[in-house]
Amino acid sequence: AQSVTQLDSHVSVSEGTPVLLRCNYSSSYSPSLFWYVQHPNKGLQLLLKYTSAATLVKGINGFEAEFKKSETSFHLTKPSAHMSDAAEYFCVVNVNTGNQFYFGTGTSLTVIP
Amino acid sequence: NAGVTQTPKFQVLKTGQSMTLQCAQDMNHNSMYWYRQDPGMGLRLIYYSASEGTTDKGEVPNGYNVSRLNKREFSLRLESAAPSQTSVYFCASSQRGGAGTIQYFGAGTRLSVL
């Protein structure tokens, strides 16, 4: 079975400080992992994805994530938060053979000026 | 560069009414999906269509029907709306299923059932 756990429902950071959004997954197969971002009243946009190549994945807008198989984690980081990063972030897992994507419950990121 | 287009953007229904949510993509994708998003629950898959002519149930299909009209269009129908179906509905598409597939999402339909 596949599942995704986002460990924090809300994260607040000050502008210019690092961002860490945590995601743990479980999967019976080699997973593909994604981070999507959703700005208010918008659809979801892909930030980055992991598909069994390099374990450190760089995405758009300065975000990156590291796949750690031993810890079954795929945490999202950014060195310096910007006001425009305030949004909802979703960690998603997909397995090789299926059309089903499993979403975490989301982490709401607030950036304080 | 329209991507995935959903209509309508907002809808209010009374209990028992029916309606169809429309979704169209212009990326020549094979797979299409319908999700619902509820507070604190992330996105849950209602139905998906791996290719034209096929549809499959997802995690929460009860109370919904779908039609893959052609490669571009995938509609979601509520035959008899219930307050529990108040949600934000997202349509998505992807080139195919499987490893590394990126989904592209529409802007959503906000549905309230009174």
Image (spheres, helix red, strand yellow):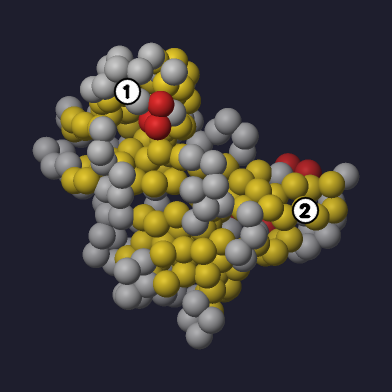
Q: Is residue A63 left or right of residue A90?
A: right
Contact? badges 2 and 1 (CB < 8 Å): no
The amino acid type, in three-letter code, at marker 2 is: Ser
Please tell me the numbered disc located at residue B81.
1
The amino acid type, in three-letter code, at marker 1 is: Ala
Please tell me the numbered disc located at residue B33.
none
Q: Which residue lies furthest to the bottom in this view?
A: A70
Q: Position of residue B95 (x, y in %)?
A: 29, 48
Q: Position of residue B87 (x, y in %)?
A: 45, 32
**Crowding at label 1, few (<14), some or many (≥20) Cα neighbours within 10 Å?**
many
Q: Quadrant of the C terminus of chain B?
A: top left
Q: Position of residue B113 (x, y in %)?
A: 42, 21
Nearest to viewer (mark 2 / mark 1) = 1
Are discs 2 and 1 located on one and the same chain?
no
Front-most of B90 and A67?
B90
Q: In this view, does B79 lie above or below A100?
A: above
Q: Residue at x 33, y 32 (%)?
A: B25
- Where disc 2 sits, the SS reads strand
Can the viewer see residue B41 in this picture?
A: yes
Q: Is residue A17 left or right of residue A86?
A: right
**Crowding at label 2, few (<14), some or many (≥20) Cα neighbours within 10 Å?**
few
The residue to which callout 2 is attached is A12
- Where disc 1 sits, the SS reads loop
Q: Quadrant of the N terminus of chain B?
A: top left
Q: Residue at x 53, y 81 (%)?
A: A71
Q: Which chain carries label 1?
A: B
Q: In this view, does A29 lie to the left or right of B112?
A: left
Q: Which residue is drawn at 32% across and 69% down?
A: A1
